[in-house]
Image (cartoon, coloured by chain):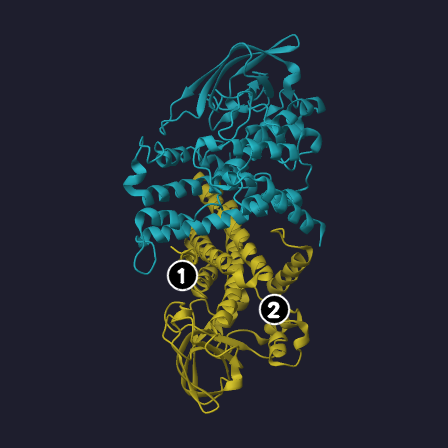
Chain colours: A cyan, B yellow
Amino acid sequence: MSDLEKFRRETRAWLEANCPPEMRKPMTSDEDTFWGGRDAKFSSEPQRAWFERMRDKGWTVPHWPQEYGGGGLDGEQAKIVRQEMAAIGARAPLVSFGISMLGPALLKYGTEAQKKEHLPKITAGLIRWCQGYSEPNAGSDLASLQTRAETDGDDFIINGQKIWTSYANYADWIFCLVRTDPKAKKHDGISFILFDMASKGVSTKPILLISGRSPFCETFFDNVRVPKSHVVGTVNRGWDVAKYLLQHERAMISGMGERGVGRPLGQVAADSVGHDEQGRLEDPILRGQIAAFEIDEAALAAAAERAVDLAKAGQSHPAFSSAMKYYGTELNKRRYEILMSAGGIDALEWESERSKGGARPRAWLRTKANSIEGGTSEVMLGIVAKRILDLPGA
Amino acid sequence: MALVLTEEQSMLRDSARGLISDKAPVSHLRQLRDSKDATGFSRELWKAFAEMGFTGLLVPEDFGGSALGCVADGSLLAAFAVDEGAKHRPLQTNLQAKRSGNGFKLNGAKAFVVDGHTADLLIVAARSAGSPGERDGLTLFLVDPKANGVAADRTAMVDSHNAARINFDNVEVNADHVLGEVDQGYQLLEGVLNIGRGAVASEMVGLSEEVFGRTVNYLKERKQFGKAIGEFQALQHRAAQLYIEIEITRAAVLKALQTLDANFDSAGAAVAVAKARAGSTATLAVQEGVQMHGGMGMTDQFDIGFFMKRARVCQELFGDANFHADQLARMKSY
């Protein structure tokens, strides 16, 4: 037996022994996600147990170095952990922007002191992070951002406004893009800086969305004082860090459409639509749409697997995450259009207990942001055209 | 297993690419078409393929001398006769095989038998029991095309390749020419078809990639309104979408081929996904290719039309995207 096969066998046995049955069921509500943070609450005992066991094993982030609370696994081993978790439908024990966005940027651009300070608190779920990128006048044209950071001795004084800050009202710290040189060209005067959301002068205001929920906030900075040592990378070179982090953000968002666990969409649809006498979905056009969707979903899963393997083999293009982001988000929107169509009038209930407070229509509406957040589909296609296909212009 | 080519596979790809771009560029097919070549393909090229080992990739080495060995070394051409109607429906097979003496008598007709007009051996799917639509009752036969009652009609197809319509009129076949078990041929048939589907899906990925490469080059070269047409966002976004479709399909096809290697009997879903995706992607690639080449894309002088025609044939071969979507839905019970 090869070392990897042995590792797979041990992983399978450990997960079998340690993942509570409740944590192997598909997530159905926001409460099923554990985000960590100073005010973190577990929604159930199994959720707590699962998180703590995974944390103690270093598997909230299996591929980060052990010194930062990760599992120290190499790419092949981390893939095995993912596969074995998927095989039993295990939920992620901890979801956090610290893991999926800030961590990779800190590992690449952070000082040793910054890594030691922040990464262990991410892996242990102690600090919940939010992302200060977009501004009211800097959306797709992110580099035109205006939030300014002015020097005052060893500190920066930060003033300005961010928008679409996911869960800013629950976050402990923020990684934020600020303008440190207003005279430089727009990409050259930006810095990437970290600060505590409890700092004096930080305030947040949730934005009510079409889903009736408020996952995003407006975030205001009024003379917020931040030590210059909190800049990640070089002052005025923050765009490099920002772009690198965006690649990871796009990979994360493209994965929102990935399921692979739970019941096939066709069977979910059959609950409401029914079968004909041959056992096929009663609505033949919907059946065809679902089959076409599931083909694309399986193909995307293969492409996601291949993207990881290509990166390991040193053959990946840095802009490929834009391709995956585009496809994954458009696919997830399709999934929810199908779910709404399959659900019929049942999927229109907004407040009833039967509908868990309109879980399906609210989730459907939430997916519409997928192809906007983290770079619109149109921006993604522009990046692919220019950076991968090398098409001329702009 | 990682979803990237191994070093050995990359070398194989490079040697295939070298041979084909040297000996069989599009101009080679164009010449076969224009000269109305009697065989419809180059036996010399087939020999070169055999010498490179491509014809024997699926055959273990210790079969030298046998019929299988002759297929592997390129000296014996076998053709696969499955389809009967306009669409690929293997379960609907209705060519009759009735027991007679020490063997069977075959009656019926096959269509879309690729290169069936020059084959030295036919592998024929027939119904020895039951009714069309049933899994039980299918049997595969090895049939000599020169046997009494076999009549092959060569048909030049839209892609300048050849397929035959073949009639079987009281064709006698010995019992020892049954491939596998009598009445139990479905699993063997489905396995062979899945290998064919994986191969055709791969061909369609290559075809899509080639059309796409030519099209992107054209977008960079062709100037209108004083600039390269590739500067226009309307075309940039469509090119980017096509690129993404091709890359995702490439991954799906790699996955299916690896599943066929590792877990042959449970590769059905992965193969259905790959063949369906490859069909849709190739269809998109050739349509965008012709459209973005403008009027030039419509000319016979330009090669791009050959790819469009081949993609149409590959879609139908061993089941189109709709067939495989339906298969997937059946596998998942909806």
In this rendering, the answer to whether A254 lies above or below B41 is above
Q: Amino acid at mark 2?
A: Leu
Residue at mark 1: chain:
B
Residue at mark 2: chain:
B
Is the Cβ of the residue at disc 1 closer than 8 Å to that at disc 2? Answer: no
**Residue B18 position in % (x across, y down):** 64, 61
Q: Circle 2 — which element?
A: loop
Report which residue position mark 2 lands on.
Answer: B58
Report which residue position mark 1 lands on.
Answer: B323
Towards the viewer: B283 or A231: A231
Neighbours of disc 1 within 10 Å: few (<14), some (14-19), many (20+): some
Side of A49 relative to A327 (left or right): right
In this rendering, the answer to whether B146 lies above or below A323 is below
Q: Amino acid at mark 1?
A: Phe
Towards the viewer: A167 or B11: A167
Side of A171 relative to B13 (left or right): left
**Residue B123 position in % (x across, y down):** 50, 78
The numbered mark at residue A324 is none
Q: Can you name the residue that lies furthest to the left here? A: A345
Towards the viewer: B53 or B67: B67
**Residue B93 position in % (x across, y down):** 40, 74
Quadrant in the picture for the N terminus of chain A: bottom right
